[in-house]
Image: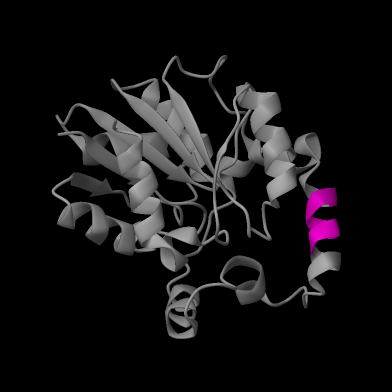
Amino acid sequence: MPTFVLIPGAAADSWYWHLVTAELTARGHDVVAVDLPCEDDAAGFPEYADAVVDAVGDRRDLVVVAHSLGGFTAPLVCDRVPVDLLVLVTAMIPAPGEAPSDWATNTGHAQARSEQDARDGRDPDDDIALFLHDVEPTLAAEAMSRSLGQSGTPFGKPWPLETWPAVPTKFLLCRDDRFFPAEFMRRVVRERLGIVPDEIDGSHSVTLSRPLEVADRLESYLV
């Protein structure tokens, strides 16, 4: 039985995945949802990868799943341990030597976000409308209360891999994502991975708004 290894994005911990974890576990899957040292100013992506590898232990038959900023960590894990499949869920896709602080400029994300904000008419200070607009209000409020500090240490350092790992890779795009707009991500996935993403309804916080659908998609990749 494969093990799903779930990596959160920035300023988040394993709670972000708790509904998907429960769904996959109920179906009999082994799941490792990882907490990263995101508040530690001494930790960069190598240390984030260390945390994942330590959590995995001696498990094999790994399906590594990463959300958002976790897209910078997951390929490093694939470079460290045998991984059968890498799944990026509305995640950043780094280029060799690229620092996360340069990603928005290099990909055109800032312009895409600006255009999306104009379409939404969103208050720029309303993070729920940006990240959690389709999440049940009580759960969205809990998610906001659980937000962690995010150290800036990883953002200024070049991504260390010279090439994308030789691991089969899937990308699950969220059609209602206001933070990483769908049309923008379709282009980035095509340019950086050379694949067509799979698509699902849902916001940037799709694991909270549509955990059943996310679990279904992840399970479908095992066939």
Q: Is residue 84 magenta?
A: no
62 over 55 or under it: above or below: above
Give coordinates of residue 103: x percent, y percent: 71, 38
Kindly identify the residue that appears in the image at 24 percent across and 46 percent down: 32
- Image position of 52 (left or right of 167): left
Magenta residue span: 111-116
> Image quarter for residue 146?
bottom left
Could you tell me which quadrant the C terminus lies in? top left
Could you tell me which quadrant the N terminus lies in? top left
Q: Is residue 51 visible?
A: no
Give coordinates of residue 135: x percent, y percent: 50, 74
Give coordinates of residue 54: x percent, y percent: 24, 37
- Nearest to the observer: residue 92 or residue 35: 92
- Image position of 93 (left or right of 81): right
Q: Is residue 75 visible?
A: yes
Kindly identify the residue that appears in the image at 41 percent across and 19 percent down: 167
- Nearest to the observer: residue 80 or residue 124: 124
Magenta span: predominant SS is: helix
- Image position of 153 (left or right of 145): right
91 over 190 or under it: above or below: below
